[in-house]
Image: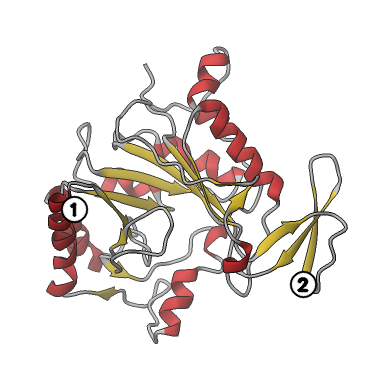
Amino acid sequence: MAKDSKIEWTHHTFNPWWGCTKVSEACTYCYAESWAKRLGSDIWGTRNQRRLFGETHWRQPITWNHEAEKEGKRKRVFCASMADVFENRPELVEPRTRLWAMIESTPWLDWLILTKRPELIERFVPWTAEWPENVWLGTTVESQEWANKRIPILLSFAARVRFISCEPLLSPIDISLWLPNFVKENKKAKRPKAQFYIDWVIAGGESGPHARPMNPIWVRQLKDQCVIAGVPFHFKQWGNWKPIPNGVKSKQVKRQLKDTEGNIITLINLGKKLAGRELNGKTWDELPTTINSNKIE
């Protein structure tokens, strides 16, 4: 849990518990697992217990809600950075039920719930057609395979905002099927059944000692799809690997990839901080409006 989070797209983070089990390629070098182990907590995998919290921990969002109301400015809360709210384990039933009540009692906080298990959302949320106005529901899509599996499920829910996080971005992803302008301009195109469009896209490369490099073409293609569709785009980070212009010499560790025309792209391992967040000469910090405007009619 953290007030004034360093994550670029949220104000605070809140974890109803710590710990998880890996489910897809994005989990391979999980930062949350590494952080927990660094602090001496062995809470990952099916056999290990999750770390639960007491009353002082659970009172923090109430304080944040009062502060936001007093300031007259809504605050975003990422839930959960060290877990997955929809992991299916018996000991998580009580804190998950408590979380839903917490969300409903903090109307000045927008709760950003990101999951790699969208297939379990319907089973565990207490809401059906009417969701609280302060819930932003998201899923991780690191590749086209997971986009095809997870996005249609996400878009079946009536959360105020539906978003995807393409971080770590591990392959090119075409999300045009689920963006507004695609459907308008391609009336005959087949599209997975869904009630809504994507409201927001987050993308970023992987960081950490085992970070896999992200091809700049992949993230630029995502950005271009969002710009054309008028969907807010947030570029969180390059991660460890940043592209450099051809011909520039560097003593840093290098990787070489290819663009769509077969041209060589050189990336160097600078680390997250030095690699930065600028894409095409701009910092992309776009956010969705909190209006349910992308419903398919």
Toward the bottom, the furthest residue is: 40
Instruction: Tell me the quarter of the image containing the C terminus.
Output: top left
Q: In this view, does 89 lie to the left or right of 183?
A: left
Looking at the picture, which amino acid does disc 1 mark?
Ala
**In terms of image quadrants, where is residue 16?**
bottom left
Q: Residues within 10 Å of mark 1 (few under 14, many from 20)?
A: some
Q: Is residue 69 left or right of residue 77?
A: left
Looking at the picture, which amino acid does disc 2 mark?
Val
Q: Residues within 10 Å of mark 2 (few under 14, many from 20)?
A: few
Q: How many labels does the image show?
A: 2
Residue name at image x 62 percent, y 75 percent: 209
Please name the residue that numbered disc 1 is placed on.
68
Q: In this view, does 75 lie above or below 195?
A: below
Residue name at image x 55 percent, y 22 percent: 182
Q: Residue 92, how many percent across, how many down?
A: 25, 64
Please name the residue that numbered disc 2 is placed on.
253
Q: Residue 116, how many percent across, how many down?
A: 44, 53
Residue name at image x 41 percent, y 64 percent: 6
**In terms of image quadrants, where is residue 200?**
top left
Q: Residue 296, how many percent across, how many down?
A: 39, 21
